[in-house]
Amino acid sequence: MSESAYRGARVRELPRANRTYSGDRVCAAEGCSTKLSIYNKWNFCWQHEPVHEYISRGKRRSRKEMEAA
């Protein structure tokens, strides 16, 4: 009787699906009829969307670096 050996990898969870929004939305800017993507969470198209502030959070430190500090 021969022995069989199987090799493989663990089953991992799939990455989380992208958040989607209603597909029948139109840009909220007056006179703009651009249809918004289901992945666009804003109410305006790229051309009419106001500038958002960017908050720089810096580089994340590892646990070892945090414990040593």
Image (cartoon, rainbow, N blue to C red):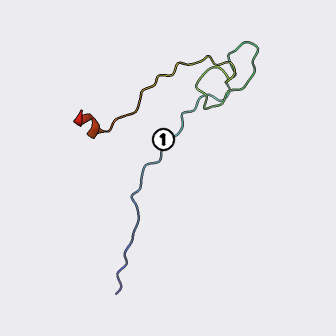
Percent position (x, y) of residue 46?
A: 67, 24
Quarter of the figure with the N terminus: bottom left
Disc 1 target residue: 16
Residue drawn at 70 percent across, 14 percent down: 29
Question: Where is residue 31 drawn, in percent x and y?
Answer: 76, 14
Left or right of residue 29, residue 64 in this image: left
Query: Would you place residue 39 above or below residue 27 in this image?
Result: below
The residue lying at 42 percent from left, 26 percent from top is 57
Quarter of the image for residue 49 reads top right
Q: Nearer the viewer, residue 15 or 64?
A: 64
| Horizontal arrangement in the rendering, residue 29 relative to residue 51 (left or right) | right
Q: Give the residue at x 58% y 26%.
A: 41
The image quarter in which residue 65 lies: top left
**Crowd band around label 1 with a 10 angstrom C-alpha radius: few (<14), some (14–19), many (20+):** few
**Is 21 in front, or is 52?**
52
Quarter of the figure with the C terminus: top left
Residue 28 percent coordinates (x, y): 67, 16
**Can you name the residue that lies furthest to the bottom here?**
1
Answer left or right for 57 relative to 17. Answer: left
Disc 1 marks a residue whose amino acid type is Arg
